[in-house]
Every structure is written in structure tokens, then in C-alpha cells.
Amino acid sequence: MKFLKNNLAVVSIILVVAVVGGVFGAKLWAQRTNLLESLQLFNTILNIVQQNYVKDVDNKELIKSAVEGMLESLDPYTQYLESDEFSDLRIKTEAEFGGIGIQIGLRDNILTVISPIEGTPAYRIGMRSGDRIVKIETESTEGFNLDDAVKRLRGQPGTKVEVDVTREGASEPLHFTIVREIIKIKAVPYAGTLNDNIGYVRLADFSRVAANELSTVLDSLFEIEGVKKLVFDLRFNSGGLLYEGVEVSSLFIPKGDTVVITKGRNPMTYQGFTSDQEQEYGNFPLVVLVDRGSASAAEIVAGAIQDWERGLIVGDTTFGKGSVQTLYPLPDNAALKLTSAYWYTPSGRCINRPNKKDTTKEQLTLEIFHTLGKAKRELHGNGAITPDIYLPYDRLNDLESKLLTKAIFFEFANKYVAKNKDIERGFKVTPMMREEVKAIANLKEIKFTSAQFDSIIEFVDREIEREIALKLWGINGEYEARLKYDPQVQKAIELLTKAKSNDELFRLARK
């Protein structure tokens, strides 16, 4: 009887394997058949074009265009790279590169500024996160991919490039003439104290020096300056290396806790990354600032801090660039950069926000997640990182946008500083300064009434102060002038002043 049962079990297993194998075998055969039919169709069309098109065709270029079109239908980050594009891929993670100083992506298939890099020509002239690039020189950017834009925006230092953008709140496109420079990336452009016990750190990039620079700055703030609480600014940070994102997170997340998980269709892409450092300064109250320009590794850090209830996230919803690209070498020193996995926060939220042109037909439904600390706060997972306190930027009106894009304050500061050698920190903006700004704007043929100008006096005063501070005292002076008017920074100070712990921060956020 036992023998019969064993044999029946074996027969059952064989039948199951046969059925499963038959189902999957049929499915694989159907997929293979469909693929062969599609390739046959492509080959037929290629032969017709080769033999009958009105002009001779370059077969290599024809195939290359077909490959690029295929990859474009997947996502903005999957690309065919020619040999000269390999060096471009490494540029952002190395020391310096030439260009105008912006990080760009595709939103709704339109070239969009993710963030200007601080201190660069694009940053100084007033390009902003969210600007949509509609023209480079005289060429419309419609149909451009990221490589098309990069090739046209980069060039020899000292040369000019004309760029037109559209911006929310502006009734017509804004035109910029930008002089290219060598772009040097500094991970931590500024750190300082906001009051007696609140420190501030701006992390601008996740290059290879990011974690080391940040660690050195934190040592200085906590050990020398004596701060007890921190504002960590990840706004306009377009990200960078995954490894640096993990290393930066490790400065805040307890040792052994998960920072990020990568996961794709191939099981080999599943990998968890954990914090590898002890928390030297403990669980100090922490506010992290994010915006639509916070992307990639910046979202890894913000997501891990939020999930583990390590700090409070304040600002705007992040960009949603949470994917892993794998390089596959190809003939002629080319390569395929293929999106192979997505990034997930420790609670399981997918960071990547799907592209509208995605042909995979994947639909991400709104899922509910919870933080991993004792509060178990509710989180929404639908791509990107949603802040705990939503506080977007104030929109500029037409006149404010034109004054910035026409570099009115930049020109004013150059002239004013040249004529006034005794300006000291803490100077006050005077009516005479405002009149000079008006005069320069009139010369640039910016149309406005006295009432319109008077309605933006606070904005004008802030920009005068910021631009003069930048000219006289560099990036540190600009930060000192700008942060005291920054609504998100001021909100962070308000929260941290009242809170003695992160638990109190979370209670304040719920009020």
C-alpha cells in the first residue's frame, strides 16, 4: 500500500511537471514565434527601404535609428551609447566637465530642468527646476532625447549657447544667453549654523566625494559649532552614485538597517543595501528638505530617513528617478545602458515614477505603506518621495521671472559693487538701489508699471541683497542672505526650535 502511494505521488509530480512544462513551454514558444514574426516584418521593411527609397540609405545609421527608437519607448534612461558617449556617462561622477551647469530629464516627453548646479552659468542666470527647454539655439527640442540635448548644451568654455524655456507662471517663453564654463562639482557647497543649536548642511551632489565631505562637515558642526539639531538640504540635488547614496544614508541610519533595495525582473538584480556605520551623534532632531529637483540618490536618502522615522521630510514631492542602469558592452566600443531594476525604500515603496510613454503598460496603483519605527506612520507609494509636510515654492509672476531671466539683478550688482567699495555685511537695501534696478530693467525693455514694481518690492530687496552678497562674499555670503528668507528653511527652524526629539517633530507635523 505504501509502495502504491509513493508511486501515485511520483506519477502526480510527473503529471504536474508535464502540465506546468507544457503551459510554460507553450507560452515561451508563442513568445518566440511572435518575436520571429516581428523580426521578419522588420527585415522585410528594411529590404524595401534599401531597394526602393528615393535616395541611398546608410544601413548602419538606419539600424541605429531603429535601435534608438525601440529603446526610447522603454524609459528615458535606457540608451544606446556610442564610444564617445562612454566618457560623457562618467563625467558627472568625476571631478569636472564643461557646459552650462544643469541636470535634465524628460517629463511628459519634454526636456525638463531637474536642477541647476549651484554656482554655474545656468544657476547664476536664473534657470530653475521645472523649466521646460523648448529650443536650443534655433532648433526646437521636440522629439529630443537626453543625449540630443547634452550634445548641444555642452561645448568649449567661453562659447555661448542660446536656450529658450517655458515656465509655470510665465506667459511666454524665457530666453537665456549662457556662456559655457568648466563645471566643477562640490558635494557640500555650504554648511553653517542657523541659530545657537541648529545646523544647516546643503548637499548638492552625490559624486565620489559626497559622503566624505558630508562626514567632515557634520564633525565640524557637532564638535566645534556645538549644534544639537540639523536641517539637511537635498533640494535641487539630482543625485548620482547609488553607493554614495547608501554611504550618505549611513551617516543618519543606524548600523544594520536597510537603506535601499534594488529589484527587477531578473532575480539576480535583487540586492539589499544596509547602513554600515554607528550613529556618532545619536538620534538628533533632523529635518530634510526636498523638492521636485531632488532625484536619484537624493531620493534614496530621503526615503530611508522617512521610513525609519529618523527625521521629518519637508518641501515638495521629489522627481521620481529610482532606477538602476546596467551597461552591456557592444561592438565598436559602443554599449547598451539598460534599466534593469528599480529602487525601493526600506518599507517597500518604489521610488521610480513611471514615464507616460512607457510601452511596458505597467500600471502602478496607489499603495499604502507604513514607517518602520514605533509610530508606524502612513506613507503613500506611487513613485517619488512625498514629504511629511508639503510646502512648495511660491510661484514667480511674469515680472519677477523676467527680472531674473534678463539678469537684471546680476547686472545691477556688478555696477553697484564697482561703485561702492564700503559695503558691509548686514547692509540695508535703499530706495536708490531699487531705482537703479528699475532703470536697468527699462533699458532691457521690460514693460511694467510703478504699481507692478511696488507690488514685488520684497522680492526685489531679497534679490538685490542675495546678488550683492554673492559678488562680495561668494557662495557663503549668498547662502547667508538667502536662507533667512527661505520659507522651507524657516519652517524647519520653527519645527526644530520647538522639538527636543524626532518624536516631537512628528507630533508637530500632525498638528
Image (cartoon, rainbow, N blue to C red):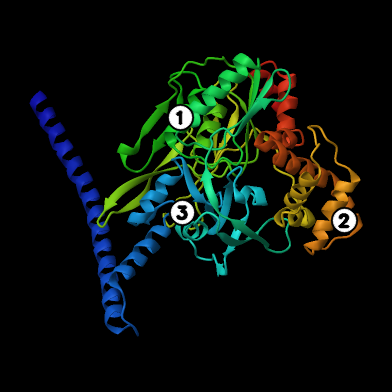
**Up-down: is 391 above or below 415?**
above
Q: Residue at x 72, y 50 (%)?
A: 410
Labels 2 and 3 touching (C-beta < 8 A): no
Question: Closer to the N terminus: mark 2 or mark 3?
Answer: 3
Q: Amino acid at mark 3?
A: Pro
Amino acid on which disc 2 is placed:
Gln
Expressed as whole percent of the image width and height from the top left, the position of residue 433 reads 85, 47
| Residue 74 or residue 119, whichever sits in front | 119
Q: Which residue corresponds to mark 2?
A: 452
* C-alpha separation, residue under disc 2 versus residue under disc 3: 41 Å
Q: Secondary structure at mark 2?
A: helix
- For the N terminus, which image quadrant? top left
Camera-near label (1 vs 2) is: 2
Residue 443, how many percent across, how many down? Answer: 80, 62
- The residue beneath circle 3 is 76
In this orientation, does residue 375 appear?
A: yes
| Count of numbered circles on the image | 3
Q: Is residue 147 left or right of residue 433?
A: left
Report if the CB atoms under discs 1 and 3 are less than 8 Å apart.
no
User: Which quarter of the figure has residue 483?
Assistant: top right
Q: Residue at x 88, y 52 (%)?
A: 435
Q: Quadrant of residue 222?
A: top right
Mark 2 vs mark 3, foreground winner is: 2
Q: Gap between marks 1 and 2, in whole Å?
A: 48 Å
Badge 3 element: loop
Q: Nearer the viewer, residue 282 or 342?
A: 282
